[in-house]
Every structure is written in C-alpha cells, then in structure tokens.
Amino acid sequence: DEGDLRLAALVHAASGSNTVRDILRHCAHEDIVDVYSKDFRRTIAILSGEFIVKGHNLVDQNRTTYW
C-alpha cells in the first residue's frame, strides 16, 4: 500500500544520506513520487525545499512551470 511505498522510498533514499533534507530531496525526485498523495508530495516539497518537481510547483498548485 501507499505507506509501504513511502517507507521503501525513505529507506532507499537513506542509504548514503546524512540528513533528513537529503532524504526528502531524493524522494522528491524519485519516480515513485507519482504514487504519493498530493498532500504528502506537498509536505516533501516544503520540508526539502524542492518546491518544483517534474515541472509542477507543489506549493502553488495554480502555477505550472515549463522547462
């Protein structure tokens, strides 16, 4: 389920990382981010400082970023 996928992503991200921000930043750029709920993706964005993931601004849903 979604909780298991989150845990798997965090464990995967934790290998070789020393800070929570590194882990969250890693999760923000993993393909697995697509299975997260919108609220969880937004939380990752805020905590990691990675507000734009895959061309979408996760904090301001009304603004789309084009590469």
Image (cartoon, helix red, strand yellow):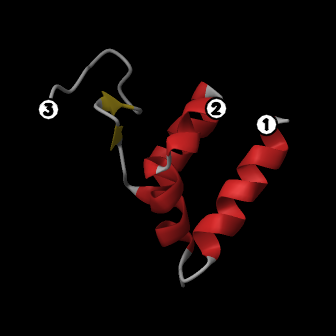
Q: Circles 1 and 2: CB distance less than 8 Å?
A: yes
Residue depicted at x 35% and y 26%: 60
What type is the residue that disc 3 sits on?
Answer: Trp
| Mark seen at residue 12 | none
Distance from the alpha carbon under mark 2 to that under mark 3? 22 Å
Identify the secondary structure beneath mark 3. Answer: loop
Image x and y of residue 51, in percent: 35, 43
Q: Residues within 10 Å of mark 1 (few under 14, many from 20)?
A: few
Which quadrant of the figure contains the C terminus? top left
Q: What residue did someone put label 1 on?
A: 2
Image x and y of residue 48, in percent: 45, 58
Q: Nearer the viewer, residue 23 or 15?
A: 15
Q: Please tell me which of labels 1 and 3 falls first in the chain.
A: 1
Image x and y of residue 65, in percent: 20, 27
Q: Please tell me which of labels 2 and 3 falls first in the chain.
A: 2
Q: Circles 2 and 3: CB distance less than 8 Å?
A: no
Q: What residue did someone put label 2 on?
A: 35
Q: Quadrant of residue 56?
A: top left
